Image (tube, helix red, strand yellow):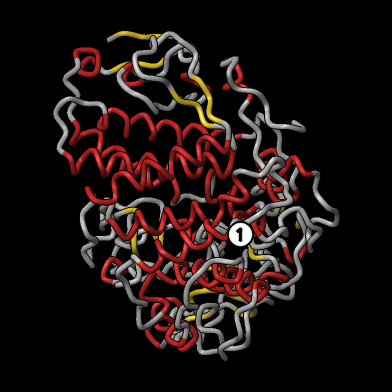
Amino acid sequence: MKKINIIKGIFFASTLALGVGCTNLDEEVLDGYVIPEKAIEGTINPVQFLATAYEGLRNFQGQGTMFALNEMSTDALVGPTRGGDWDDAGVWRQIHVHTWGPDHNEVRGAWNQLLSQVNNCNLVIFSGSGTTSQKAQARFLRAFYYYHVIDLFGQVPYREAGSSSLADPKVWTRSEATTFVISEVEAILADLPARIVGDPGTANKDAANFLLAKLYLNKGVFTAADAAGPYTFAAADMTKVVQHVNAINSSLAPDYWDNFKPTNNTSPEILFASRNSPGNGGNVQCFWRMGMHYNQTPDGWNGFATVAEYYDKFKPNDRRAKNADASIIAAFGNPVGFQIGQIYKPGGTQIVRDRIKTDANPLGQPLKFTRELTLITSGATLESAGIRAQKYIPDVASLGSPDNDFVLMRYSDALLMKAEAILRGGSGTAPNMTAYFARTNSPAVTLDLEEIYAERGRELWYEEYRRNDMIRFGKFLQERELKKYVSDKRYALFPIPSAALFNPNLSQNPGY
C-alpha cells in the first residue's frame, strides 16, 4: 500500500480525467490517505466502488452532518441541552442559532462525507472496465453529492485530466460548479435506466430529472454575487424546471405515510432513496429515536425537538402531522408524526412516566411533551420540554436495523417545484394538486409563493430541504422563536473546514 499527503493528492483517480473531487477525511487520518493497490495498478473494480458510492447515501440518514445542517439550522428543529445530556460542547445549539465556525464537527463531517463519496464515484467513472450504465449511475451519484457541496459550501474542489496526484486540487466557484453539474446530468439522461417502482434505490431517469429541476430552481441562488442574496430567477431557468418535472413519470402515493413505512420502497411517489433492509439498515432509526423519551415504545434518546412555531404551520387535522391509525396506536401508543401532550404505552391507555421521581410521583411524573422549550433545559421539564417527532413509521420487526428506505426525492416535491417555477416566471401549465391536497385531510389552498413556501414546510418536514427552501425564499437569516436576531449574511453558507484550507486554491467563505 502507498500513502500520500492528503493535502497534495487525495484521489488516484483524479489523475485520470476531468471533474475529480477531493476531500479531507476525519481528523484522525488528515495526514495521509491509503490508496487501494488495485487503484494504483489500474484494475479498479467498478462494481465494488459503485456499491460503495450508493452506500454513501446512508450519510444522509443520521441525526448529524447533512441532516443537522439542513434542518437544525432552520425554524424546524432544535437540539437543546438537557441537564447533562445533549450538550456536546454546544454543537447542536450553535447550528440552530447560527454561531458555528470552521472547526464545527458537523460542518467538517458533512464536507468529508460528501467529497469522499465523490471519490468513490470517480473510481467508477474513470475505470477502464465499467459498463455504460455503471458509469452513468456513478456520474449521477457524483452530481447528487456535488449538488449538496454547492448548496452547503459554495466552493467545489476538483482535478483536471492528467494532473499530478501530488498537486493541489483546483476549485470551482459556486456558479462554475452549478454549470458543470447541470451539464453532467443532462449528458447522462439517455444512459440512465427508467425507474422501476419498487426499486427507488437505483439511479434512474426520474431521479435525474428531479435533480435537474432542483438545480435550475436554485440556479438564481447558486449564481448570485452574494450568497445571501438578492437572487434573480431567470424565466428560462424556471421553464427548465417545468420541463424536467413534466418528464418525470410518477404519481402520488394514496397515503402520505406510504412514503415512510417499512415497506416504503413500494410507493410510486419515491423517485430516489437510500436502500435499506432488515439487518442491513442504515440510520433511519434516528428518525424515531432522536427525540423520543427513554421510556417510550420504541425507546429513544430524548434529544431533538420541533420548534413550536414550526409545528403551528400545520392546519388542524393535517394527516402529514399526525398518523394516529389504530395499528399505530396499538403498536406504539402514540401517533407517528408530531407528539405533544400525554404520552402512552402501546395500546394508548396506560401513561408513560418520565424518570424524575418526586415525593408526589415516586414512579416518575406523567410524561407530557410541551410546546415550551429553551435552548438549555433543566428542572421538572428536563425530559418533557419540546414537541417530538417521528418522520418514519418504526419497523417493529427490526427497530435497530430497519427496512424503511431513506427518502431522498419525492414526486410531491417535484410538483411543488413546478408550481413555484411557474409563479417565478416559467412557462407551462400549473400542476393539478387535487390528489396532493386530498391526502392531507385539510382544505386545498391557492398556491401563491408564500403558500408554496408554507406547503413545502408541511409536506417535506425533516426531509433535508428546509434550509435550501428558507434561503431561496429569503427567510433563513431572519429572527425566529429561539433565535431572537437576524443572522449575519455569512451564515447563508457554511465555512470551509479549517483543515481543508491547506489547499491554497480554497479560500474561506466570506465573513468566517
Residue 137 x/y as whole percent: 26, 44
* Residue at (40% x, 20% y) in the render: 160
* Residue at (37% x, 77% y) in the render: 252
* Residue at (62% x, 64% y) in the render: 355
What type is the residue that disc 1 sits on? Answer: Asp
Relative depth, front residue between 404 and 247: 247
Residue with the most extreme right position: 485
Q: In the figure, 341 relative to 94: above or below? A: below
Is residue 310 visible to us here? yes
Q: Looking at the rendering, which quadrant does residue 223 occupy? A: top right
Q: In the figure, 395 relative to 177: above or below? A: below
Tag 1: Cα neighbours inside 10 Å, few (<14), some, or many (≥20)? some
Residue 21 x/y as whole percent: 43, 27
Q: In the figure, 36 relative to 58: above or below? A: above
Residue 301 x/y as whole percent: 54, 56
**How many numbered marks, from 0 up?**
1
Relative depth, front residue between 354 and 169: 169
Q: In which quarter of the image is the C terminus?
A: top right
Left or right: where does residue 278 sit relative to residue 366? Answer: left
* Residue at (26% x, 58% y) in the render: 278
Q: In which quarter of the image is the N terminus?
A: top left
Relative depth, front residue between 42 and 98: 42
Left or right: where does residue 258 sit relative to residue 51? Answer: right
- The kind of secondary structure element at disc 1 is helix
Is residue 303 visible to us here? no
Relative depth, front residue between 347 and 240: 240
Residue 381 x/y as whole percent: 73, 66
Where is mark 1, residue-wise? 469
Left or right: where does residue 260 sit relative to residue 133? Answer: right
Q: In the figure, 159 relative to 100: above or below? A: above
